[in-house]
Image (spheres, helix red, strand yellow):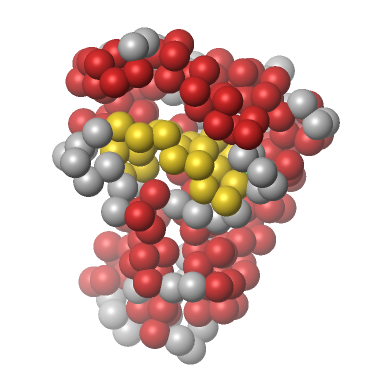
């Protein structure tokens, strides 16, 4: 993953001043339409996500966080630094989860774990869509692996991230209004139902297998 790669590069050059950079959108801005419009992606990636990264760089300058990986900052910081670090991480993970040519169904070990725990992929999607609709205010709904190795649906407000809770993130749904309001207005559940068509289960399965 690009953020991790950048972190490793910085660890080998410890005198370098660290500034995080937002990875470019890994597909064309028009590539996820009609489920997610070009206008949404231009605002979401270039304005919202970029602003979190810029703010994070501003906030960590001259602090001990300057020398940490993004994941370490997420685990150790609070307040504005945590919010902007987690939002930077969450957005890169979110955009990387979506694809113009997604694998529509999980396979392999992930598929077996989902079927065993949730009954079926459809039931998992229903539960996550319901969690996204029910989350009050802004936040993220995640599929994560908990410390015992079980899959968990985790609803986090604002910038919250499973890493903060000792869990491994596998998939996330951004339920901040900026993620859907241009295309779906107030219909958050409809935006999540459409989002499933763009979630790449190949990427999610590779994350699950990376243990
Ligand atoms: Mn967002």
Residue 32 in view in this figure: no
Residue 134 in view in this figure: yes
Which part of the image, by quadrant, shows the C terminus? top left
Query: Picture quarter containing residue 30?
Result: top right
Query: Which of these two is toward me, 46 or 157?
Result: 157
Query: Which of these two is toward me, 197 or 77?
Result: 77
Residue in the image at 59% along x and 33% along y = 132
> Please, is residue 79 above or below residue 198 in the view?
below
Query: Picture quarter containing residue 100?
Result: top right
> Please, is residue 134 above or below residue 112 in the view?
below
Q: Position of residue 121 (x, y in %)?
A: 39, 13
Residue in the image at 77% along x and 26% along y = 187
Query: Which of these two is toward me, 37 or 127?
Result: 127
Judged left or right of residue 175, residue 40 is right
Q: Position of residue 190 (x, y in %)?
A: 70, 20
Q: Position of residue 114 (x, y in %)?
A: 31, 19
Judged left or right of residue 179, residue 114 is left
Residue in the image at 41% along x and 64% along y = 74
Number of on-image labels: 0
> Please, is residue 15 above or below residue 90 in the view?
below
Q: Residue furthest bottom?
A: 62
Residue in the image at 38% along x and 58% along y = 164
């Amino acid at each position: 993953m690009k953020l991790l790669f950048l972190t490793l590069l910085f660890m080998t050059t410890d005198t370098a001043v660290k500034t995080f950079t937002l990875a470019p959108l890994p597909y064309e801005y028009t590539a996820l339409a009609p489920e997610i419009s070009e206008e949404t992606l231009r605002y979401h990636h270039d304005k919202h996500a970029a602003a979190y990264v810029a703010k994070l760089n501003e906030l960590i300058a001259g602090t001990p966080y300057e020398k940490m990986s993004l994941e370490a900052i997420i685990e150790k910081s609070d307040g504005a630094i945590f919010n902007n670090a987690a939002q930077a991480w969450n957005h890169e993970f979110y955009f990387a989860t979506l694809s113009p040519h997604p694998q529509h169904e999980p396979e392999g070990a992930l598929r077996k774990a989902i079927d065993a725990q949730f009954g079926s992929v459809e039931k998992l999607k229903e539960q996550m869509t319901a969690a996204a609709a029910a989350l009050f205010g802004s936040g993220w709904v995640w599929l994560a692996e908990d410390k015992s190795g079980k899959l968990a649906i985790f609803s986090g407000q604002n910038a919250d991230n499973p890493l903060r809770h000792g869990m491994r993130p596998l998939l996330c749904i951004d339920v901040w209004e900026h993620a859907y309001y241009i295309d779906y207005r107030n219909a958050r559940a409809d935006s999540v139902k459409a989002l499933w068509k763009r979630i790449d289960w190949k990427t999610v399965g590779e994350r699950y297998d990376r243990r």
